[in-house]
Amino acid sequence: VIGTEVTAVLWDIDGTLLTSGGVIARTFLEAVEVVSGSRPNLAGIDFGGRLDPEIASLLLASAGHDHTLVAEVLAHFEALVAARETAMLGHVMPLPGVLRLLSMLAELGVPQTVVTGNLRSVGMFKLRAAGLVPPIDPDVGGFGDSGNGHERATVAQFALDQLTGAGWRTTPQTCWIIGDTPRDLACAQALGLRCALVATGRHSLASLAELGADVVFPDLSEHEPALQKWLA
Ligand SMILES: [Mg+2]
């Protein structure tokens, strides 16, 4: 029994469910370079929790190009990932405790899907490579290219609409976003959802703890006291 009521979980992908060891991020940079002819300048850009179309726009701007090449960059990125899936498989790994927590929630009948900035094709590759489908049901999730959203909260609303359409009860107060960045929390707050943050991405536990999330976990391992309390 979960102490805090949880009727659905919307998982972030990168830094929360899994890591792809930077190999897919480097492919994104390669796509920008191939399409624009310029090497992006990453200095000062905080990518965490942004949508991939937004990241493409920022990378293009860093190389002196405007957003008109975004669609072409994203298409090339998807093509590169698709062509390299076999080589990339071994780089994608679930983060500590993820498999166990996913199956615990599944046993409790809690629907689980994703809210991510990843393009659907790339996010699907990562989820499958990490062995997370099922229990994750990506069909009711929100991706960086879902709907016509330009921000994370729109992607989350898209996922909520899918869940509702599938007949799940998702009152905001019992639907949780689990993520690893301030943008995951901002997204949850924009829609009145609960939020758990986990410090397995680029943000430290101390920096996440200051943000006002409902709960913060160092990681999702079974011995973490905060996780035990959340599940108690
Ligand atoms: Mg993340």
Image (cartoon, rainbow, N blue to C red):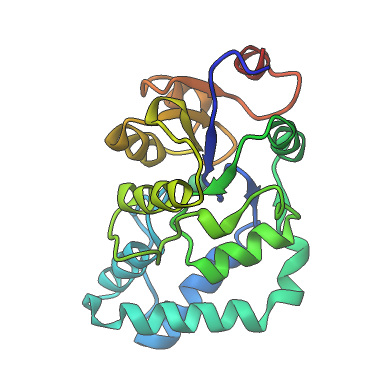
Residue plotted at (37% across, 54% down): 158
Depth check, front residue: 10 or 24 = 10
User: Considering only vertical position in the picture, is 68 above or below 121?
Assistant: below
Residue plotted at (58% across, 42% down): 16
User: Considering only vertical position in the picture, is 114 above or below 92?
Assistant: above
Residue plotted at (63% across, 12% down): 229
Residue plotted at (48% across, 32% down): 176
The image quadrant that residue 60 belongs to is bottom left
Residue 34 position within the rendered picture, expressed as x and y whole percent measured from the top left = 44, 86
Residue 24 position within the rendered picture, expressed as x and y whole percent measured from the top left = 58, 66
User: Considering only vertical position in the picture, is 104 above or below 65?
Assistant: above
Q: Quadrant of the N terminus?
A: top right
Q: Would you say 220 lies left or right of 131 here?
A: left
Depth check, front residue: 79 or 170 = 170
User: Considering only vertical position in the picture, is 210 above or below 204?
Assistant: above
The image quadrant that residue 144 belongs to is bottom left
Q: How many marks?
A: 0
Residue 183 position within the rendered picture, expressed as x and y whole percent measured from the top left = 36, 41
Q: Would you say 56 lies left or right of 14 here?
A: left
Residue 161 position within the rendered picture, expressed as x and y whole percent measured from the top left = 39, 50
Q: Quadrant of the C terminus?
A: top right
Q: Would you say 94 lies left or right of 173 here?
A: right
